[in-house]
Image: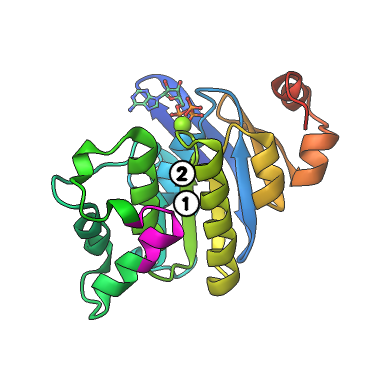
């Protein structure tokens, strides 16, 4: 479904991403892990099409724009109600109001549907933005740290919502996370980035419990997974 070949992305003279070859299969659930600045958001932004690579090719099967749901690391809230913010993702749907409400329920935010979106807390804004992403069926979800600002209960709500959504839609999931335990719960494959390069790629269980690359071992050394 997703294919990258000889992809490079530079910011100024600094190369933030350098991936010679990589595939993500349809229906796969893939976690991206790696230290701050290792290129996780850059890779997700590139797959979402919000930035373009400087070199190489990124192929995304035959997906249309609406079939891809992207959650940025710092989601944006428009200055109207939470409900309206979610309905924005549902333009053209005659059931948009109902669909938005279902999505807000899934992320546990229905009690705030009439609140002004730009006054939400960080964790609430993130959940609202996720509701926008899962309000309609997608073929590919690209989620940049979907639970970074969530408390433990919200994290559980979000993870359950995602697992249900994947089961119902059969969509492909690519997400970044700083929590190896979350990678174990939500993914079958894990990509460990090391300063913009593939440090290691393999089954999540293997990468987290028996890392082969020295960079992955170093990255995971403080974690008890
Ligand atoms: N717009 C930009 N302009 C200049 N440099 C950038 C820009 N975006 C990212 N970078 C740099 O590119 C590198 C990769 O950044 P990226 O945001 O992809 O990292 P990340 O793995 O998502 O980190 P984090 O865990 O902190 O979210 C970093 O060194 C960052 O400083
Ligand atoms: Mg990031």
User: Of residues 149 and 207, which is closer to you in this image?
Assistant: 149
Q: Is mark 1 within 8 Å of ligand 2?
A: no
User: Outermost residue toward the right?
Assistant: 210
Dot 2 alpha-carbon crowd within 10 angstroms: few under 14, some 14 to 19, many 20 or more: many
Quadrant for the N terminus, please. bottom right
Q: State yes or no: residue 109 in magenta.
A: yes
Ligand 1's image quarter is top left
User: Residue under circle 1?
Assistant: 142
Q: Residue at x 77, y 36 (%)?
A: 208
Between label 2 and label 1, give the one nearer the viewer.
1
Residue 143, percent from left and from top: 47, 47
Residue 196, percent from left and from top: 55, 29
Residue 153, percent from left and from top: 54, 43
Q: Secondary structure at mark 1?
A: strand
User: Outermost residue toward the front?
Assistant: 111
Left or right placement of residue 98 versus residue 136 in this view: left
Quadrant for the C terminus, please. top right
Q: Is mark 2 within 8 Å of ligand 2?
A: yes
Bounds of the magenta segment:
102-110
Numbered tag placed on residue 44 in the rendering: 2
User: Whole-Å distance between the Cαs marked 2 and 1?
Assistant: 6 Å
| Res 64 → quadrant | bottom left
Q: Residue at x 41, y 28 (%)?
A: 10
């Amino acid at each position: 479904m997703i294919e990258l070949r000889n992809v490079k992305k530079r910011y100024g003279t600094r190369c933030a991403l350098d991936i010679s070859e990589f595939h993500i299969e349809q229906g796969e659930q893939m976690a991206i892990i790696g230290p701050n600045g290792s290129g996780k958001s850059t890779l997700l932004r590139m797959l979402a099409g919000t930035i373009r690579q400087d070199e190489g090719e990124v192929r995304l099967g035959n997906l249309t724009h609406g079939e891809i749901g992207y959650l940025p690391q710092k989601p944006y809230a428009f200055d109207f109600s939470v409900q309206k913010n979610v309905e924005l993702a549902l333009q053209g749907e005659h059931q948009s109001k109902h669909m938005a409400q279902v999505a807000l329920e899934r992320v546990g935010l229905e009690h705030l549907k009439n609140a002004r979106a730009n006054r939400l807390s960080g964790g609430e804004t993130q959940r609202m933005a996720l509701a926008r992403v899962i309000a309609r069926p997608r073929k590919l979800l690209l989620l940049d740290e979907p639970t970074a600002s969530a408390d433990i209960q919200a994290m559980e709500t979000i993870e359950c919502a995602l697992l249900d959504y994947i089961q119902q839609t059969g969509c492909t999931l690519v997400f970044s996370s700083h929590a190896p335990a979350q990678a174990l719960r939500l993914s079958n494959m894990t990509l460990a980035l090391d300063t913009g390069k593939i440090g290691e790629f393999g089954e999540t269980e293997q990468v987290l419990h028996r890392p082969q690359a020295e960079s992955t071992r170093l990255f995971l050394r403080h974690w008890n997974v």
